[in-house]
Amino acid sequence: MRIKQRKGLKYLIFILIGTLIMLPIWLNLRMGHLDFEQILFLIKSDGQGTTIDWPMIGSFLAFFVPIWLVVIGLVYYIEKQKMNISLNNKKIKWLIVLVTLITVVIYDQQFKVSSFFIKGFESGDLYEKYYVHPDSVSLTFPKQKRNMIYIVLESMENNYSDVILKDESQVNLIPHIQHFSQLYDSFSNTNALGGPQEIKGASWTAASLVAQTSGIPIRVSMMDKGFGEEVGFLPGLITLGDILKEAGYRNYFMAGSDANFGGRETYFKSHGDYEIRDIKYYKEIGKLEKDYSVFWGYEDAKLFEFAKEELLEISKSDAPFNYTMLTVDTHFTDGYTDLSCDFYYDEDYANAISCSDRKVNDFIKWIQQQDFYDNTTVVLMGDHQTMNHEFASQMVDKEVRTMVNVFINAKFNHYQADRLTNRNFSALDVFPTTLASLGVEIEGDRLGLGVNLMSEKETLMELLTKDGLDEEIAKHSEYYNRNFLLESLAD
């Protein structure tokens, strides 16, 4: 019995070794390079609200089962040849050392671990030089405050407008969103369709939400106290929600998942006292059955349906509102396409993107028919690049990838049409630009690390270049830890 157990353990060890070696390769094929900081953030923040991603599990098994079978077969063959593969064998030990070193290099390439630690020990002065505290400048709201419907579109890139699918058809998956970009105010890095580029510390949903609403990226170190409910999510930060609440707005955050995931609920509740509308909420009030679960929670068809009902009720109040929504159907791995959608394509993700484009169009058209629309600014904003690396490889333009940004029925002061094009910018600049779209006059046109894009001021990406900005964000910042994380108080 013990011999069988030892044999089983031996097989298990070599299967584990094979899995560890090949895991970053599989991740790279599925998602491209991942940032170690993102993984660390998810560990430190509130991690509830995750869901089982069956397509991802299927992809994992399809990739690894053949590898496991090869490993089992190889170990079995070696044993049959009566070769010594005991872990006490010196040659085996040296082989394990070599494999370990190779594995470390592969993991470093995939997750940029060494860069995280090297830059983390280098001190920077990005915030001392460029951060503008919202309390240090005058923010003047118009006499009649405007409502805002802020729609964050999961993984929504402008590059979806020109994709060559596996059947070699060249398609535009976002014709309605592209039309909105042409019809209304949309900032571009070119003379054509474009938008913000992804930067370090804003490359996943929670981080992008923070950057868009506060003008700073997420910066995680091994030693900080975290971003969860127990210690607070950047407790020293002043955000869009804080500013709007002080101005008399009611804030709402709606998501088709559990808002706890990634600390989003903690962030929005502690910065602007947002009322949370997620899957927990709709189960509690009986809109969804207790065991309801589709994709990450509930699908966008219900998200927009619930939003319409709530907006009609909220708009009856005299108080201005900020209704922030986060779509989910275009989430990695292959999105979700409900039966109300047209299945034009053979690829699941293409159908999910195309259907999301139509749903967004229908929702915007509905908003424009409502009485509250005249005094409401509607913002469409992609959060980050898609993590579907395989699908991204089908984009015609893969070199420069930008996220969607559209300001519908905006009321910018000092409007300048030439400022809409050839702007290199990031999610950081969305913070002051969003306030400006509500007719808010911002003293100096800078807020957080961002710039009002309708102004003449240069963005940090224009001043430092994208690579230069990423490098500065990666550096250790005492200012960040002391003023946003309040580490000195926590200690």
Image (tube, helix red, strand yellow):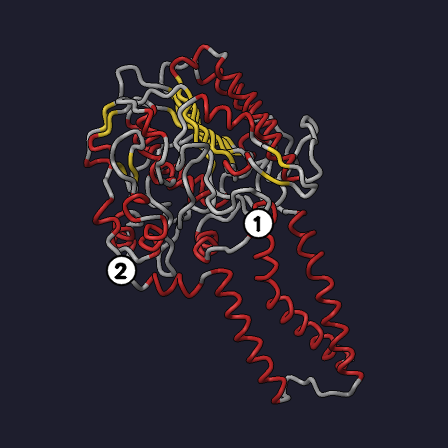
Q: Identity of the amino acid at label 1?
A: His
Residue 67: percent from left, percent from top: 70, 66
Query: Circle 1: is it few (<14), some (14-19), or many (20+) Cα within 10 Å?
Result: some
User: Which disc, if any, is residue 389?
Assistant: 1
Residue 112: percent from left, percent from top: 45, 61
Residue 85: percent from left, percent from top: 69, 84
Q: Quadrant of the C terminus?
A: bottom left
Judged left or right of residue 412, residue 23 is right
Whether residue 436 is situated above or below residue 487 in the rendered picture:
above
Q: Identity of the amino acid at label 2?
A: Ser
> Quarter-wise, where is residue 275 in the image?
top left
Residue 355: percent from left, percent from top: 62, 30
Nearest to N terminus: mark 1 or mark 2 = 2
Q: Residue at x 50, y 12 (%)?
A: 369
User: Which disc, if any, is residue 123?
Assistant: 2
**Which residue extends farthest top?**
371
Judged left or right of residue 301, residue 79 is right
C-alpha gap between disc 1 and disc 2: 33 Å
- Residue 38 visible to an observer of this rendering: yes
Q: Residue at x 42, y 36 (%)?
A: 195
> Quarter-wise, where is residue 320 in the image?
top left
Nearer to the camera, 85 or 483? 85
- Residue 235 visible to an observer of this rendering: no
Q: Secondary structure at mark 1?
A: helix
Q: How many marks?
A: 2
**Which residue extends farthest bottom?**
90
